[in-house]
Image: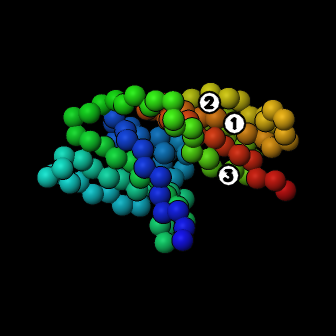
Amino acid sequence: MRILHTMVRVGDLEKSKDFYCKVLGMKLLREKEYPGGEFTLAFLGYEKESDGAVLELTYNWGKDSYDLGDGYGHIAIAVDDIYHICDDIKKKGGKITREPGPMKHGGTVIAFVEDPDGYKIELIEKKG
């Protein structure tokens, strides 16, 4: 078994695709409209779906926002140079909500960025 994807609902599909592709460097792997259900699915990732887990963006036509609730945590992405990546994200208009630095009670260097819908993405610097 393996994790295939994580799904999040988005209020503006183009804005979200732009953020994940242009700001976080993912690739749009596939996209399909479902007129009967009035929704569109877009799958994004850093590698092919057959090689790793991806992110599924679900846009329900006519719905422009969601209450994220208190059950959602974050999506985590491993990065090589977290300080450089965060600077690059800021230059591309991304919103860093926690600057890079060691996590409390540990030595792992992390940062948080927020997507257009308010979802948190944790950046974790690879060790070594």
Q: Nearer the viewer, residue 16 or 6?
A: 6
- Give, as a three-letter code, the residue at label 1: Ala
Q: Nearer the viewer, residue 95 or 65?
A: 65
Q: Which residue is mark 1?
A: 111
Instruction: State the separation of the CA atoms marked 3 and 1.
Output: 11 Å
Q: Is residue 27 visible?
A: no
Point out residue 71 in the picture as x, y percentages from the top left corner: 51, 35
Q: Is residue 16 left or right of residue 90?
A: left
Badge 1 element: strand
Determine which quarter of the picture holds residue 101: top right
- Give, as a three-letter code, the residue at label 3: Ala
Relative to 5, does residue 115 appear above or below in the rendering? Answer: above
Circle 2 crowding by C-alpha within 10 Å: few under 14, some 14–19, many from 20: some
- Give, as a three-letter code, the residue at label 2: Ile
Q: Is residue 86 left or right of residue 75?
A: right
**Which quadrant: the C terminus?**
bottom right
Of pointers 3 and 2, the one earlier in the residue sequence: 3
Query: Which mark is on residue 96?
Result: 2
